[in-house]
Image (tube, rainbow, N blue to C red):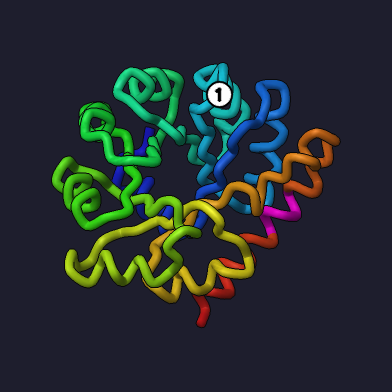
Amino acid sequence: MPEKHVLRERIVESGVIAVLRGVSEERIVPVARAIHDAGVDALEITADGTHTAEKISAVDRELTDTDAIVGAGTVLDAPTAESVIDAGASFVVSPHTETDVVRICNRNGVLVAPGVMTPTEAVTAMEAGADLLKMFPASTVGPDHIGALSGPLGDVDIVPTGGISPDNVAAFFDAGAVAVGAGGAIVDDEAIAAGDFDRIRENAASFLEAVEAAREK
């Protein structure tokens, strides 16, 4: 597993973490493959359903000869963190700040991005040893909230997630995001149900183009 600082640099360089939420065990590998083929390296498989460890292991095996970064999201507690790390997760993302999750990840050398919304949560996460801060849900507060956090706290590495689309991603990067998390804008439930992985690939490619355009401004 690459060192945390290497993973962090790669995620920031790419600018996108694709959030694979609610994808079945039967579909997770082709969906992950389609997204990675489009150029998105960081794949977050959420732990809010069943067979999460099996999904992570399957995707990790399928993409083992690529530069994919396979991680876990919606990790709510330390036991779940341990489970996904054992399954091969290279990074862990939470919707909230749980210091035990941060501690487990640091102990195992795994990049961790806890969820924050307030300055108190952000400081708690940073003091616990977070590598990135997931601002969630980003659509609730909008891009200006990045400045509201970084103003009093200084240079913080914020990854807004929740409601990010090609139409608004530029505003979040303009506000200071180092990367973004994208779920529904890439992972189309109807396309998955139909087995239309070309559409998933196209969604991912379009989102990545929007990120690259935003960063070129």
**Which range is magenta?**
201-205
Q: Is residue 34 left or right of residue 179?
A: right
Circle 1 is placed at which residue position?
A: 49
Residue situated furthest bottom in the rendering: 217
Q: Classify residue 94 by image quadrant.
A: top left
Give the secondary structure at mark 1: loop
Give the quadrant of the N terminus: top left
Along the viewing direction, whichever of 17 and 95 lies nearer the viewer: 95
Picture quadrant of residue 2: top left
Q: Is residue 14 visible?
A: no
- Relative side of 164 to 71, left or right: right
- Three-letter amino acid code of the residue under disc 1: Gly
Residue 201 x, y percent position in the rendering: 73, 49
Q: Residue at x 46, y 33 (%)?
A: 72
| Magenta-colored segment: predominant secondary structure | helix
Q: Residue at x 81, y 46 (%)?
A: 198
Residue 107 vertical position relative to residue 172 in the rendered view, above or below = above
**Residue 154: image location, x then y, percent:** 19, 68
Assess whether residue 204 is covered by the magenta stretch. yes
Q: Position of residue 80 (x, y in %)?
A: 38, 21
Residue 71 in view, yes or no:
yes
- Seen as rendered, the residue at the extreme left is 127
Write down the quadrant of residue 113 in the picture: top left
- Towards the viewer: 140 or 154: 140
How crowded pointer 1 is (Cα within 10 Å; few <14, some 14-19, many 20+) is rated as few
Q: Give above or below for 55 relative to 164.
A: above
**What residue sits 23% from the left and 49% below the top?**
121
Q: Is residue 212 magenta?
A: no
* Residue 31: % across, % down: 69, 37
